[in-house]
Amino acid sequence: MDEALVKARFRDIEENYKVITENIAQAAVRSGRTPDDVRFMAVTKTVDSIYINHALSLGVDLIGENRVQEFLGKRDELNLDGVEKHLIGHLQTNKVRQIVGEVDMIDGVDSIKVANEIGKVSQKKGIITDVLVEVNIGGEESKFGLDPSKLYETVCEMSEIDGIKIQGLMAIPPICTNKEENRKFFSNMYTMFLDIKAKKIDNVNMSILSMGMSDDYVSAILEGSTMVRVGSSLFGRRVY
Ligand SMILES: *Cc1c(COP(=O)(O)O)cnc(C)c1O
């Protein structure tokens, strides 16, 4: 690796991190909360360990990886002491066995089937796995996530599965060209979150609302997000 390039990218990450944490803090205050009420997740898919470690050295304490194989392959190179690790996005049932027990939370549980499998494997390993339930807020056929109209009944059903504990909701809005439209999705999502929280379902802890990515995390926070998932704005554009 070219040392000058590595150093330049380190500086970019530092600068980006500063800007993002300031934006998060301001948005949190504007939404009537404190900066500590919104957690920052660094999304590390495709990013080399050296850059992830640099972000961790700056104070990032939560990372999200999409791919089971990629995470398991690079985690030994990461300085993960005191760092919370989440698997984000769609998880295939046949990958559940490999990831349960290896991360602190599985964000993006999008079906009873995968929830059952996580529960089954967790019980076998003698643990309880924290999960977020993924909602398809745009109702798009191409996206994973639960249909909002079936959310309550599905969360109720999932709440009875042994071996998992629901900690909140996660959502990816449709790709909108219109920022106002996006805010509408976030605000609908927040309403759903409050509604479900108010129902006080047994074994469900509605404390996390994960929404907002590089392009829209400020709007998401203004509409009530408690956790933002930022990749490219921190590490630079992904190279696949
Ligand atoms: C990749 C990814 C992100 C981060 O996306 P950016 O636009 O790079 O911030 C967030 N959430 C999920 C589920 C992702 O897959």
Image (cartoon, grey):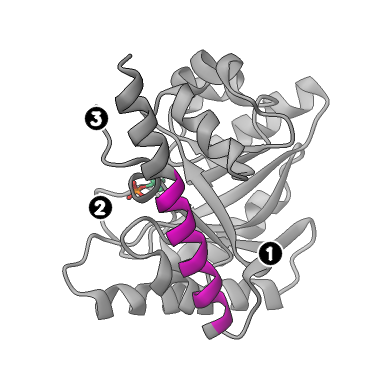
Report if the CB atoms under discs 3 and 1 are less than 8 Å apart: no
Image location of residue 233, percent across then percent down = 35, 51
* Residue 23: percent from left, percent from top: 46, 68
Tell me if 218 is positioned left or right of 200 in this view. Answer: left
Answer yes or no: do the residues labelled 3 and 2 have beta carbons within 8 Å?
no
Q: Residue at x 78, y 36 (%)?
A: 128
Q: Position of residue 225 (x, y in %)?
A: 53, 68
Residue 23 lies in magenta, yes or no? yes
In which image quadrant can residue 20 be found? bottom left
**Is 28 covered by the magenta stretch?**
yes
Q: Amino acid at mark 2?
A: Glu
Using a 10 Å C-alpha cutoff, classify the residue at mark 2 as few (fewer than 14 neighbours), some (14 to 19) or many (20 or more): few
The image's mark for residue 206 is: 1
According to the picture, the residue beneath numbered tag 3 turns out to be 239
Hey, which quadrant is residue 44 in on the image? top left
Residue designated by label 2: 141
Residue sitting nearer the eye, 24 or 196: 24
